[in-house]
Amino acid sequence: MAQITYDEVNLMLRLYDLRREPRLRQARAWFTDNFHPTSPEDMIEKYPQGSEENTYIRMVISYWEMVASIVNRGLINDELFFESNGEIWVVWDRMRTIVPTWRAAFKNPHLFQNIEETCKRLEAWREKRAPGSTVAMRQMLGQSKSKTRVI
């Protein structure tokens, strides 16, 4: 196990404090319960620019993209981060199918690359510790999709 520094722990706690901000907490709860786009067109139709839902989506994705950029630069040890931050993977799993279209539309092949890279490492780390867990989580999330509440 890698030696963890005070600075890494402090940064983790600061990021956790940001997650506790009431509006971001509300956005995260909405995203987890309701964000299931089937395509970018579906997303635009359901969550138009200027809507509260669109704001929630942007808040959640930009928060986790920022966090992933910090992790990818080695400012927080991967294992320390992965042990208590599975939510980033849920966010990536919800958005991963529409990211290629977003990248093409914005002509930016690096769009959301931080989340993607972090989640690839998280999956590999988790599968090494608990083989089959990624598939099981996707199945569980797929089942919960049909039971989500509408706000």
Image (cartoon, rainbow, N blue to C red):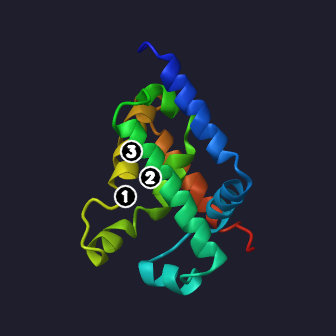
Does residue 87 appear to the left or right of 38 in the view shown?
right
Q: x, y (%) of residue 128?
A: 40, 29
Q: Which residue is mark 3?
A: 69
| Number of residues whose C-alpha sits closer than 10 Å to that of mark 3, classed few (under 14), some (14–19) or many (20 or more) | some
Q: Please, is residue 82 above or below residue 136 in the view? A: above
| Residue 105, quarter of picture | bottom left
Question: Which of the two labelled residues, at mark 1 and mark 2, occupies the earlier sequence position?
Answer: 2
Q: Please, is residue 69 above or below residue 95 in the view? A: above
Instruction: Look at 53% across and 66% down and name the residue there.
Output: 58
Q: Are marks 1 and 2 in contact (CB under 8 Å)?
A: yes
Question: Which of the two labelled residues, at mark 3 and mark 1, occupies the earlier sequence position?
Answer: 3
Q: Are marks 3 and 2 in contact (CB under 8 Å)?
A: yes
Q: Are marks 3 and 1 in contact (CB under 8 Å)?
A: no
Name the amino acid, label 3.
Answer: Ser
- Checking the image for residue 112, the label placed there is 1
- Checking the image for residue 8, the label placed there is none
Look at the numbered disc 1 and give the secondary structure of its residue. loop
Q: x, y (%) of residue 42?
A: 50, 82
The N terminus: image quadrant: top left
Name the amino acid, label 1.
Answer: Phe
Instruction: Look at 58% across and 81% down and name the residue there.
Output: 50
Instruction: Look at 40% across and 30% down and name the residue there.
Output: 75
Disc 3 and disc 2: Cα gap in Å?
6 Å
Disc 1 and disc 2: Cα gap in Å?
6 Å
Q: Depth check: 50 or 121 in front?
A: 50
- Checking the image for residue 65, the label placed there is 2
Name the amino acid, label 2.
Answer: Glu
| Number of residues whose C-alpha sits closer than 10 Å to that of mark 1, classed few (under 14), some (14–19) or many (20 or more) | many
Q: x, y (%) of residue 77?
A: 42, 26
